[in-house]
Amino acid sequence: MLTPEDNQLLTQTDAGTPMGDVFRRYWIPALQTEELISDGKPQRVKLLGEDLVAFRDTEGKVGLVDERCPHRGTSLYYGINDDCGLRCMYHGWKFNT
Ligand code: FES
């Protein structure tokens, strides 16, 4: 039987945890390819305790970024996906894949 400490060690996958470091070395299925449309609406994805946004750009490349814009924290889920990037709704910073 696991101790509470071992259980915590084996089940926590947030960034900076031992199991989080292990899982970040492998591919993790998150969405089906048809869920991302070129220049379509971004999709929310939660992986290993992180809130992310996935999008497919004009050229068909897939991007996966933190949901919060690094400028002022606005959700990029509401961003505009066009012209090869995802543009933040608040001040217009743009992110490529
Ligand atoms: S909050 Fe995204 S550009 Fe300012």
Image (spheres, grey):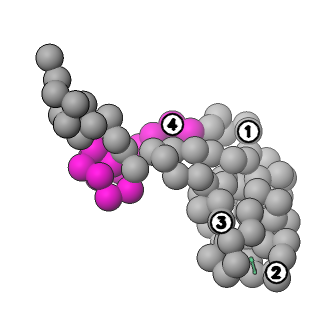
How crowded pointer 2 is (Cα within 10 Å; few <14, some 14-19, many 20+) is rated as few
Query: What residue is drawn where x is 38% and y is 56%?
Result: 15
Mark before the other along the chain sequence, 1 or 3? 1
Q: Residue 61: x percent and y percent?
A: 65, 59
Classify 10 Å Cα crowding around label 3: few (below 14), some (14-19), many (20 and above). Answer: some
Distance from Cα at disc 1 to Cα at disc 3: 21 Å
Tell me the tag on residue 29.
4
Q: Position of residue 94 (x, y in %)?
A: 74, 78
> Tag 1, which secondary structure?
helix
Please name the residue that numbered disc 3 is placed on.
68
| Labelled disc at residue 92 | 2
Earlier residue among tags 1 and 4: 4
Left or right of residue 34: residue 23: left
Looking at the image, tell me whether mark 1 or mark 2 is earlier in sequence order.
1
Q: Is residue 54 left or right of residue 79?
A: left
- Could you tell me how far apart the alpha carbons at marks 1 and 2 are, in whole angstroms? 25 Å
The mark that comes first in sequence, 3 or 2, is: 3
Residue in view at x 74 percent, y 63 percent: 76
Question: From the Cβ of disc 2, is ligand 1 less than 8 Å away?
Answer: yes
Residue 57 or residue 8, whichever sits in front: 8
In x, y percent, where is residue 43?
Answer: 73, 47
